[in-house]
Image: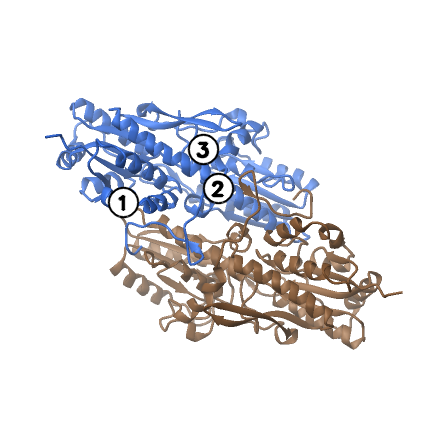
Chain colours: A blue, B brown
């Protein structure tokens, strides 16, 4: 009798618009393989996995192509998430033993974890455990993060859609801000603690009639309040209405957050920020006495599926498919990546990379892509970003409003 | 020789997604009339009018149907805005004399002012002046406001699109908020100082899998922090993740704003608010110690043309056309309104109403449309709101991003 081989997939970390598209890709790839009998999903990442909270995805999606299409368009995490990082294996390996016990019970031969660099840490540790114990399980990582801060892959699923939302919002706010005949400053605060990719993407708001955002500040470059005020003075010489894009994670030359008074840390010890925009709003009001408004582009930048980039959703789906193919080839401890072949026409290929090189590393914006004044990005950045926001993904609608897929009957 | 008759149009008050659709309607209506030689637009409302800052709209749009279509889809004010309320005519009528002098100079026979109730005050005053001096000028108001607080008209242009943005955002944030396996509260703070229509529209986020927002608080109903905490306790008995929609203008039984510590007043003496959500966020964190996030749904609710309701844009255009027709019939001191004939199928007619009955009045949410606990809206409200958010308006795109019309070459 043929050995039963099942697959298990889970999602982890913060939400994006595209993480379900990768889930859909994994499901499609597994459904299309004769090797795999059942695809399970674990609720709430490794946390739900350890509690054996599994759902049978084969039952849900096998005969329902429409549901799989809706899953592709659904923001956030269909299976739920967690912020749990597995313990180091030194000393206590009970978490891993527990997981492998569940893998044995459900005949899991292929495990897929979709997440950011903390999740790739989990993929790395699990694959080391598996190799060490010579277990017959392939552990595969699929990237996601709006921060675009994973190394090796050209960019990350979810980033393009978040970038599109940020750019469209900044453009629309530029229309909103310039209506009165009096000097004004609008400060858009954008997510990205340490990596400025998403803040940089606000540059795509510029077109042949709008130069907004007129100033862009990334966390990679030391921020000086004095220089910021000088930059505004220079802007006021040429325009009345200035739109500024700032990262939530701006720091001064000493490395202190601009919003230091409100900083706290999350479960991984990362600083949690808010208030950079508000802080600068106060500074501008005090210095220039003009109309100033700061807008925190909040959680919508990571969940506004109604502005998803078609390119992003398709690539995210393809990375899911690629992950399934990698597992079926017997690879383990690897992550599916995007490699860019050319900018124009935009072309990519999907490849496999060692997850150990990706886990816990962080890709920041290179110095050369920030202008020398530290208040804008370069043409190289624009060339890099532009292909990622192309195309309006189709949005499932009901009664005039977006309508997505939900595992729970009542959220 | 036939007398030259020209038209002049201006926009005033806060931006909406649909105020340019009404402008497009006025332009279309005037272009199609043999009576009117030239259509001028005044920059920045009556302020630019008094400074003779006029643009020739006939030249821009006469032979460019595509530009008129783009204008229809463009958020905020193409002509710019002002917050200037004309002085009372008692004693000093110099502002009115000045305006009429400009009207004479440019042969203005038809004047259209697109705005909210402060702007209708201007329309009312100008039409009284015109009648008193037996001048041959028709003064017509076209409504707009995301607040939906104008009386007599069934609803206002711009409201449906703002409602659609709010509802879609609350739905997407509900997807975002329920991913972790721990109790959480999300508080969405929505615009509307005194009228709760826009906050109420968050109810449209509900569908057959999502009951979010689970609690809705309007400014028309006295807000009690104690009752709010009780409402949350009741919610926690049935769900872990609670989504709450609150108006920025919530007040306690004594009439004090919940965010009283941060209140200020604008040029019209209206209280300017922010911080209701932040204030309640602190209260929830303190009381329940759970994850809580407040999101101020900021200026995007009034400028996110990428989420415009097709019904809203078309009606706004029709109200512009109706205004033009009213002027050509020789009416003055009147505003174009929408009257609803039926809910299902949704049918409206466009009519004319005395602007004196509209200026400075405010339509609040009726008591009967708020549930008795003051934490939700009724079925009548849903029936009223639903038709207004139907249809995705087409969004002009360039390079993957929205691309609108701008009078200025560089905003």
Determine crowd level at label 2: few under 14, some 14-19, many 20+ residues with C-alpha closer than 10 A: many
B29 is higher (above) or lower (below) than B337: above
A297 is higher (above) or lower (below) than B90: above
A4 is higher (above) or lower (below) than B345: above
Q: The C terminus of chain B is located in which quarter?
A: top right
Q: Which residue is painted at 46% across and 53% down in the image?
A: B296
- Horizontal side of A84 relative to B74 (left or right) equals left
> Same subunit under labels 2 and 1?
yes
Residue B10's tag is none
Q: Secondary structure at mark 3?
A: loop
From the image, tell me which residue sits under label 1: A63
Find residue A247 and report its horizontal and vertical position in percent: 49, 39
- Tell me if residue A52 can be seen: yes
Q: Nearer the viewer, residue A3 or A178?
A: A3
From the image, tell me which residue sits under label 2: A190
**Pointers 1 and 3 in contact (C-beta within 8 Å):** no
Task: Tell me the mark number nearer the camera, choosing from 2 and 1.
Answer: 1
Parent chain of label 1:
A
Q: Secondary structure at mark 1?
A: loop
Residue A195's tag is 3
Find residue B280 and report its horizontal and vertical position in percent: 40, 58
Q: CA distance from mark 2 to mark 3?
A: 11 Å
Parent chain of label 3:
A
């Amino acid at each position: 009798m043929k050995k039963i081989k099942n697959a298990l997939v889970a999602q982890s970390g913060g939400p994006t618009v595209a993480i379900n598209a990768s889930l859909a890709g994994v499901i499609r790839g597994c459904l299309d393989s004769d090797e795999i009998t059942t695809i399970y999903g674990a609720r709430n990442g490794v946390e739900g996995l350890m509690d054996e909270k599994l759902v049978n995805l084969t039952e849900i999606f096998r005969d329902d192509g429409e549901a799989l299409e809706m899953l592709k368009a659904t923001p956030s995490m269909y299976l739920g998430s967690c912020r749990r990082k597995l313990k180091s294996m030194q000393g206590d390996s009970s978490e891993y033993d527990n997981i492998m016990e569940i893998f044995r019970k459900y005949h899991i031969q292929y495990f897929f974890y979709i997440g950011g660099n903390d999740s790739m840490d989990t993929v790395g540790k699990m694959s080391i455990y598996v190799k060490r114990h010579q277990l017959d399980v392939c552990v595969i990582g699929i990237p996601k993060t709006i921060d675009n801060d994973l190394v090796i892959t050209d960019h990350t699923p979810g980033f393009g859609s978040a970038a599109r939302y940020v750019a469209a919002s900044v453009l629309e706010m530029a229309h909103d801000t310039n209506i009165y005949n009096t000097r004004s400053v609008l400060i858009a605060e954008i997510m990205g603690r340490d990596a400025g990719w998403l803040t940089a993407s606000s540059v795509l708001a510029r077109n042949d009639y709008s130069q907004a955002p007129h100033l862009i500040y990334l966390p990679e470059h030391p921020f000086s309040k004095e220089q910021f005020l000088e930059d505004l003075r220079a802007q006021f010489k040429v325009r009345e209405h200035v739109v500024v894009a700032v990262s939530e994670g701006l720091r001064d030359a000493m490395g202190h957050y601009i919003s230091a008074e409100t900083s706290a840390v999350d479960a991984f010890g990362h600083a949690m920020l808010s208030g950079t925009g508000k802080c600068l709003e106060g500074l501008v009001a005090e210095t220039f006495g003009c109309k100033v408004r700061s807008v925190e582009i909040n959680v919508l930048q990571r969940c506004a599926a109604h502005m998803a980039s078609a390119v992003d959703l398709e690539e995210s789906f393809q990375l899911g498919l690629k992950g399934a193919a990698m597992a079926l080839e017997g690879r383990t401890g690897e992550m599916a990546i995007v490699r860019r072949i050319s900018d124009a026409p935009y072309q990519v290929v999907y490849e496999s990379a060692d997850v150990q090189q990706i886990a816990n590393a962080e890709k920041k914006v290179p110095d050369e892509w920030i202008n020398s004044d530290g208040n804008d990005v370069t043409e190289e950045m624009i060339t890099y970003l532009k292909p990622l926001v192309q195309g309006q993904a189709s949005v499932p609608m009901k009664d005039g409003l977006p309508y997505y897929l939900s595992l729970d009957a009542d959220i």
